[in-house]
Image (cartoon, rainbow, N blue to C red):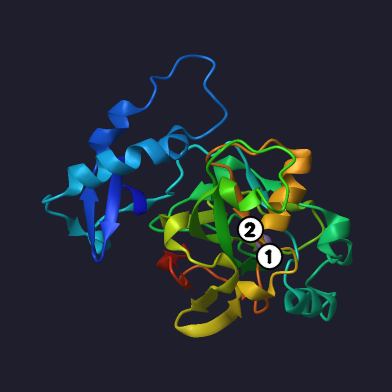
Amino acid sequence: MRLCIFDDNRLGLVQGELVHDVSAVLDALPAGRYPLPRHDLLVAALPKLRAPILALVDGMPGVPVASVRLRPPVANPGKIVAAPVNYRKHLEEAEADPATFHAAHVRKIEETGLFLKATSSLAGASDTLRLVQPERRTDHEVELAAIIGTPCKNATRETAMSHVAAYAIGLDITIRGPEERSMRKSPDGYTVLGPWMVTADEIADPAALDLSLDVNGEARQRANTRDLLLDIPELIVFASRFYTLEPGDIILTGTPEGVGPIRPGDVMQAAIGGIGTMTVQVG
Ligand code: MN
C-alpha cells in the first residue's frame, strides 16, 4: 500500500495517479488520553488497518494525487534517527572539501554514531522549504527513509528487517558549518518525508534501490542503496542498542555523493525506485 496524509490531515491510499480518501479507518485508532504514547498511532495500527482500507477503497472514486497537498506520511514520529556519512563516495567528497565540510563532522559512521533530528523539523512534499539562514551554504541530501512498525530494542541482524513497516523518500536538509548536526539539520521543515509511505511488502529489496535528486532539472545525486556502508539491518541493530525504536520512528539511512547547495526559488525533484518521485519547492 502507498499511504499519504493530505490536505486537512486526511488519510489517502494512492493508486496510480489517484488518491482515495480512507480517513474513515482512523476512527479505529485509540482515543487520545494523557499521557499520549511516544509512537505514531497510525503506523502502529497498520497491520490491522490494511483490510479495512482495501475494503473501503473498493469502488471509491479518487482525486488526482497531483491536486492534493502532501503532508508528511508519518504525522507523529517519536524520533527521527539519522545516519551521517553512510556512503563511501560521500565520505570521499566531504574529505576532499574541508572548506565546506567541517573536519569535526567527517569521520566514519562507526566512530561518529547516529544522530537525532527534531520531530518539529518534519515537513511534507508540498510544504515549501524555507531556508532559515539563506546566506549560509545549505545542502540537499536525498536518503532512503525506513519507518519502524513494531517496538524494537537490541535487534539482531536476523530480526531487524521484521521491524520495518514502510519506506519513504527523505530529504535531510543541512546547513554546512561547525555546529552540532542536531542544530544544523533541525530547523523547521529541514526533514522532508514523502511523497507517501510504501509498505515494506511492496519493496522486494531495499538494498537495491536507485535514488536520485535533481535541482532545477540538473542532475545532482545518482546512487543506489547497495552502496550504503551500514545497511538498513545494521542501522537498526546500531540504533536499537541505544534507543528503543517505536512504531513511526523514522530512520534516515544517509545520503550518497553529489550533495550541493540549494537557494530560494530552486525546485528539488527526488526519486527512489519502488517509492516514487517528489517535487519540493525551496522558498
Ligand atoms: Mn544526511
Name, please, the residue furthest toward the front: 158
| Left or right: 21, with 259 as reference point | left
Amino acid type indicated by mark 1: Arg
Q: Quadrant of residue 148?
A: top right
- Numbered mark located on residue 49 in the image: none
Q: Are marks 2 and 1 in contact (CB under 8 Å)?
A: yes
Rate crowding at label 1 as few (under 14), some (14 to 19) or many (20 or more) other CA atoms within 10 Å.
Answer: few
Q: Is residue 182 visible?
A: no
Rate crowding at label 2 as few (under 14), some (14 to 19) or many (20 or more) other CA atoms within 10 Å.
Answer: few
| Residue shown at the point (56%, 41%) measured from the top left | 120
Q: Which residue is mark 1?
A: 136
Assign ligand 1 to one image quadrant: bottom right
Q: Quadrant of residue 89?
A: bottom right
Considering depth in this image, is 234 or 12 the residue closer to the camera?
A: 234
The x, y position of residue 262, in whole percent, is 57, 71
The x, y position of residue 136, in whole percent, is 68, 65
Q: Secondary structure at mark 2?
A: loop
Considering depth in this image, is 4 or 187 the residue closer to the camera?
A: 4
Considering depth in this image, is 236 or 169 the residue closer to the camera?
A: 236
Q: Which residue is mark 2?
A: 133
The Cα atoms of the two marked residues, 2 and 1, are separated by 6 Å
